[in-house]
Image (spheres, helix red, strand yellow):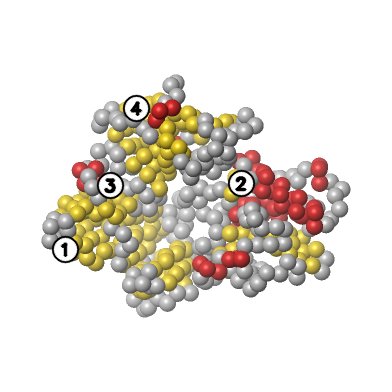
């Protein structure tokens, strides 16, 4: 294979691979290698989804200790209008090789010319449906159709909107005379000089979850149909919520069929299951005195073993088996908190992990697992107790991020963090 050094563009934030121009109807297959020492390749940009398809992808990361991480097309994701490869295990000094196949994509003339985003919609309309008893998740029976409506757009111009990565565009309409080009990833609308009217785009998410969150700006509205929901937001009898504000809903029924509120129980049961088998702390801690120094060293161990990372589309409360987490070299905040709590338990400390929704995110309806993007560990030692946040690399033992004080907790044992810092209580 030929290493195409001249095709590689590097940025501090991410790797960007400049692919060769491929005529429509032809393919390009080759290998690119990235071996710079000081770049961050946790996201590798492979180009515009409106111009190329990536039907085949294989890669290998050569890590600092000369170990190898191999992956395939499952790491390829669409982020807006870009193809990205996700490598959350990437660390500075790693090396990367990608073997990929590229096909030119003729998405249509509107996608190839000058275009501008439609921007935030004026209205969001959501309709749920279920094929049989409601079952949620990737292989579930519940679907969720979302429509964004822009009340007025004025030509001339070509306007585009991308659907979320895990959905497929189903419809696109414009009130005035226009040209439309619909693709699975979005819609392009061309309006003539003087044309003015509404534009809408709809997409479908199969295997929808049992809770959802929207952040509405001033003047935006959200309409919910096909389900009954519980929410801490103000939703009128017609199922309409108006911005500004955060709207978190938890489904109570879909299509007239009752939905069981089981998320709290499922997360707590899963937290126990992912710990079997439990990662061992190691002999270097055997016989150590139980003191602050031991806690600091165990916290440091977790932060050395796994770096902060995540995958798009992954739920922040869905943890992988902890043995896999440690082996991968990266972890979400919830996975790090679970790993730290298990290690502390092995030195006979009473430690428990809790997911936290930051206070600035607003209050979610109880039982809805939305927005719990952080996690902490509560440790009890005799008459004392303290908090740890392994995800925070600047927080010492006994400290957590200021934004988590007063945050909502997803647990059957407590529902809120203390309102202020207390290193020992």
| First in residue order: circle 4 vs circle 1 | 4
Labelled disc at residue 364: none
- The residue carrying mark 4 is 28
- Marks 1/3: CA distance? 23 Å
- The residue carrying mark 3 is 183
Instruction: Residue 49 in the image: state x and y as whole percent.
Output: 33, 42
Which quarter of the rendering shows the C terminus? bottom right
Q: Residue at x 33, y 72 (%)?
A: 219
Which image quadrant for residue 126? bottom left
- Marks 3/4: CA distance? 23 Å
- Marks 2/1: CA distance? 50 Å
Considering the numbered disc 2 on the image, is that residue within a helix, a strand or a loop?
A: strand
Label 1 neighbour load within 10 Å: few <14, some 14-19, many 20+: some
Which image quadrant for residue 357? bottom right
Q: Contact, CB < 8 Å: mark 2 with mark 4?
A: no
| First in residue order: circle 2 vs circle 3 | 3
- Marks 4/1: CA distance? 42 Å
- Marks 2/3: CA distance? 37 Å
Q: Residue at x 56, y 56 (%)?
A: 317
| First in residue order: circle 3 vs circle 4 | 4
Q: Residue at x 34, y 30 (%)?
A: 20
């Amino acid at each position: 294979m030929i290493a195409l050094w001249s095709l590689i563009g590097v940025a501090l934030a991410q790797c960007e691979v400049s692919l060769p121009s491929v005529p429509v109807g032809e393919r390009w297959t080759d290998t690119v290698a990235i071996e710079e020492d000081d770049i961050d390749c946790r996201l590798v940009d492979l180009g515009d989804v409106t111009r190329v398809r990536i039907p085949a992808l294989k890669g290998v990361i050569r890590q600092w200790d000369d170990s190898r991480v191999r992956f395939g097309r499952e790491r390829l994701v669409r982020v807006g209008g870009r193809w990205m490869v996700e490598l959350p295990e990437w660390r500075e000094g790693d090396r990367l090789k990608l073997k990929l196949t590229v096909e030119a994509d003729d998405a249509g003339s509107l996608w190839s010319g000058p275009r501008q985003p439609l921007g935030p919609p004026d209205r969001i309309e959501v309709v749920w449906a279920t094929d049989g008893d409601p079952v949620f998740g990737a292989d579930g029976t519940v679907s969720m159709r979302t429509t964004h409506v822009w009340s007025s757009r004025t030509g001339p111009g070509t306007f585009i909107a991308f659907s979320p990565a895990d959905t497929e565009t189903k419809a696109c309409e414009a009130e005035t005379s226009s040209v439309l080009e619909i693709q699975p990833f979005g819609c392009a609308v061309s309006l003539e000089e003087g044309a003015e009217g509404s534009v809408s785009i709809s997409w479908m998410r199969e295997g929808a979850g049992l809770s959802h969150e929207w952040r509405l700006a001033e003047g935006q509205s959200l309409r919910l149909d096909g389900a009954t929901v519980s929410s801490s937001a103000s939703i009128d009898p017609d199922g309409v919520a108006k911005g500004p504000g955060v709207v978190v809903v938890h489904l109570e029924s879909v299509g007239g069929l009752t939905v069981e509120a089981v998320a709290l129980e499922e997360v707590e049961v899963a937290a126990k299951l992912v710990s079997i088998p439990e990662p061992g702390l190691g002999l270097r801690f055997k016989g150590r005195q139980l003191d602050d120094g031991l806690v600091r060293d165990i916290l440091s161990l977790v932060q050395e073993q796994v770096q902060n990372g995540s995958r798009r589309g992954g739920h922040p409360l869905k943890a992988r088996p902890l043995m896999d987490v440690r082996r991968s070299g990266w972890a979400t905040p919830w996975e790090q908190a679970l790993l730290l709590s298990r290690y502390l338990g092995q030195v006979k400390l009473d430690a428990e992990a809790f997911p936290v929704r930051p206070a600035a995110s607003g209050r979610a309806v109880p039982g809805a697992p939305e927005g719990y993007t952080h996690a902490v560990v509560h440790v009890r030692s005799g008459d004392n107790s303290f908090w740890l946040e392994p995800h925070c690399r600047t927080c010492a033992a006994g400290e957590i991020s200021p934004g988590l004080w007063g945050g909502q907790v997803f647990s059957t044992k407590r529902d809120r963090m203390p309102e202020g810092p207390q290193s020992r209580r």
